[in-house]
Structure formats: structure tokens, C-alpha cells
Image (spheres, rainbow, N blue to C red):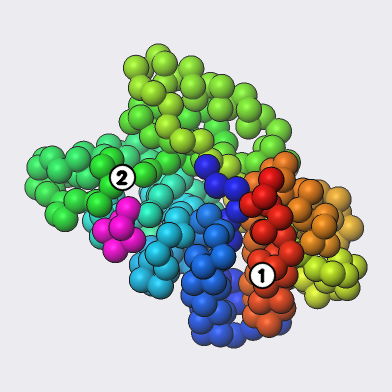
Amino acid sequence: MFQTVISFDMRAPDFGAPTRELYDAALEMCAFADEIGIDAVILPEHHCSEDGYNPVPSLMATAIAARTKRLEIVLGAIVLPLHDPVEVAETIAVADIISGGRLTTTLVAGYVQAEFDMFGKSLKDRAKLMDEGLDVIMRALSGERFDYQGREVFVRPLPFSTPPKILVGGGVQAAARRAAKHGLGLWVLQPEMMPDCQKLIAFYREECARVGHQPGPIMSTTPAVHVARDPEAAWEQVGPHIMHLVKSYASWASDVDTTTSPFYGLDTIESVRKAGFLNVMTPEQTVEFASKTPVSLTPLISGLDPKLGWEMLELFASEVLPKLKKR
């Protein structure tokens, strides 16, 4: 759906920049991204993380919406089983109105044990909660008045977009079935992180045909790019930050199955570089790379100094994006 995106998870580990400084920079960077023609911003969600991973991306989405005019805003993703689905429906509606229809919401089942513990939910119930929550959200956002768990549900206002842009995320067939059942789009991991993603997409399309729905948009995570005139020097700067991210995700994945995590075994900078989760490139290399695949910019990755993030972003704006637009 998008060729260039910018992403912020708002991690602020102890060795990185302060949280407030990162949030201020992120909002300014989104305004800049809006001006230069980046397609979208992606805002993920996690909870009870020591480094302050953004737990309420919908709030940040509305702040970004107020400071931008054309930038698409993607909640990627809300961990639905942790939340009251009626409240999620209301959040989607209001955020979509504020953004003038620029909101896309991805809903996922989650996998981090500590998050489910904090919200008083069982990880074993996530499939049931996901199915139930999706049903409630879709009915609520259609304008229907109905009963849910013995209470009447009636959501107003309704979203600006008709229908609202909602995707189901996940790497298993159950996620594809849920998306197909409701006529929603599908969010998958990029091929480097999920080798079977094309098989899952094909299964999703088959399910859509089976239930009589047209396939919705298909989105995937995109390779992260950091633009630098001297990539080796830049690796020295961003290396500790990408390692923090990789180790954090690997730790969370241990709650389900460590060996299936794309971050499994990545315990050195060399292994991370080889895996390609972050591609540090010159402007010329970035133009070639981004002309063949969508790319994601992470200028504040795991608390990176905003000054370094701005240097990267401005280099992308001046020496990469104009050439991409000509291709």
C-alpha cells in the first residue's frame, strides 16, 4: 500500500534520549514527513515495557493527525484481546474523524505473557477474545445497536471513512480466516521475517473467495533503512539501539516459541546486519534499494539521539526521495 513509511515505537532505553525529547522529535518528524511526501507513519503498541514502548499509539495518532494534512496514519498494531472492543471501536471512530479518514487500524491477537497478565487476561484465551472483539468492533462501527455481554452497545460518532480501514495482522491461518470472514485487509510480516508469507496471502485470498468477500488491502512490514554517507560510522551509532530492539523482541517471543521468532539467535551486530532488519546505506544505495521494495525509516530507533535521526531524515529527503519520485 505504501512505498515509504516512517515508524516510531517510542522506546527510550536508559542509554538513549529522554522520553519527552523523543516524543517532541517524533511529532516534528511526522510534520516533516508530511511535507516531503513520505506516505505513512506506523505506530505500534506494546505494554509494561521497561523502555517505555508506546502503550497508547491511538493518542499519538491524533496528535500526528492534528499536525499533518496528507500523511496516512497506521496503528500497527492494537493488541485487541487486551482491550474492551467497544472502547477500541470508539477510539477508531474518533481518531479517523480527527485525521479526516487517514487512519488505518491493524488488530492483532498478541503474544507477550506480561501484557496479558497486566490486563488480567489469559494468553490461552487470545483467539476467543480476538474473534469476539472483531465481531463487536465491526458491528459497532456499522452503526448497529446491539447487546454485548448483557449491555447495550451503541457507538457514536461513526468513523469518517465508510467503511473504516481495518486490517487483521498475524502470521497464521487463523488471522487470515478472521480477515476474510469480515472482509478486512491482512497485515503480514515481510518475507525476510516470515518466509511463508506468500502462502499465507494465497490462503487469505482463497478464504475470501470461499466466504464471498473481495480481498482487502494486504500490507506487510517493510525493510528498515538508515541513510548515511558513511554506513560503517553510522553502524557504530545505531548498533546499540538496533541490538536493544532485537533482544527485546526475542525476549517477548520466548512467551510463545523462541525458535519461530525472526529475532531468534541474533545476538551480535554481525548477525543482525546479515539478517537485514536494518539496512544502513548510502543515499545512492538507498535509491536502488527503495526503487525495488517499500522501505521504512526509523529515525528514533530505540532512543536514538534525535539529532542523528534528523540527519538521516534530511539526507533521505534531499538525496533519496526526489530520485525515487522520478522513477
Q: Name the one closer to the observer, 236 or 323.
A: 323
Q: Tell me if residue 28 comes above or below residue 146 in the rendering.
A: below
Quick one: label 1 or label 2, which is nearer the N terminus? 2
Q: Secondary structure at mark 2?
A: loop
Amino acid type at image mark 2: Pro
Q: Note whether residue 114 is visible.
A: no
> Taking 190 as reference, is 231 left or right?
right
Q: Which mark is residue 164?
A: 2
Kindly identify the residue that appears in the image at 72 percent across and 41 percent down: 292
Q: Residue at x 20, y 44 (%)?
A: 140
Vertical order, 101 against 248 (above or below): above
Measuring from the top left, give residue 47's x and y in whole percent: 48, 64
In the image, the segment drawn in magenta is: 95-101
- Asked whether 291 falls inside the magenta stretch, the response is no
- Residue found 31% across the figure and 45% down from its top: 164
Residue carrying label 1: 313
Q: Which is more toward the observer, 34 or 129? A: 34
- Vertical placement of 100 versus 54: above or below? above
Q: Which quarter of the rendered picture does the C terminus lie within?
A: top right
